[in-house]
Image (cartoon, rainbow, N blue to C red):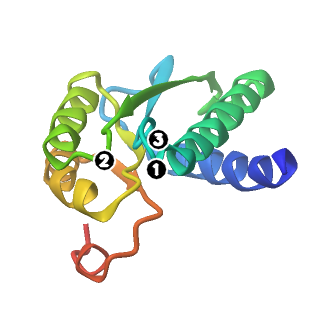
Amino acid sequence: MQTNRRAFWLPALALTMAMALPGCQRGVPETVKIGVAMTLSGPTANRGQDLLNGALLAVEELNGAGFRVRGKPVKFEVVAKDDKADVQLAKQVAQELVDQDVRLVLGHTNSPQLQAALPTYVSAHALVFTTTTQRTLVEQGS
């Protein structure tokens, strides 16, 4: 199973970084923070924990491979936040991630939490990858 996670996360993360980082106005950063905003505790935590573990594995492998952008080595760091499946907490989590200069977010696990957090990410021009498929979120275009 780890091989399947690696097969998904590593190329997806590398491709995203390769596309997003060259456009950074401040140049290529030394460290890229990847936010993982999920339900990480409580009765529905298993899905969030699985996604967090996949992100941690991908980051470990990217860092081990010496990932570079424009010839400059880039290290990745995961910033995990537990939204506890709470809409108000999801807004707070989004703001904390943006305040920590996170520009790529994996999350939120549930549609109501993502809907609450999305305006914060959009206003910060953060890329958001989610497993949420609620029609109103998908049709927003952001």
Q: Mark 2 points at which residue?
A: 85
Residue type marked 1: Thr
Residue at image coords 22%, 47%: 121
Q: Which of marks 3 and 2 is nearer the N terminus?
A: 3
Across the whole image, how many numbered discs are drawn on residues?
A: 3
Disc 1 packing (10 Å; few <14; some 14–19; many ≥20): some
Q: Against 138, is 59 above or below?
A: above
Alpha-carbon distance for marks 3 and 2?
Answer: 34 Å
Q: Point out residue 130 in the picture as x, y percentages from the top left corner.
A: 43, 59
Alpha-carbon distance for marks 1 and 2?
Answer: 8 Å
Residue type marked 2: Ala
Seen in the image, is 72 located left or right of residue 63?
A: left
Q: Mark 3 points at which residue?
A: 22
Q: Earlier in the sequence, mark 1 or mark 3?
A: 3
Q: Are marks 3 and 2 in contact (CB under 8 Å)?
A: no
Q: Mark 1 points at which residue?
A: 44
Quarter residue 41 falls in:
top left
Residue at image coords 25%, 54%: 113
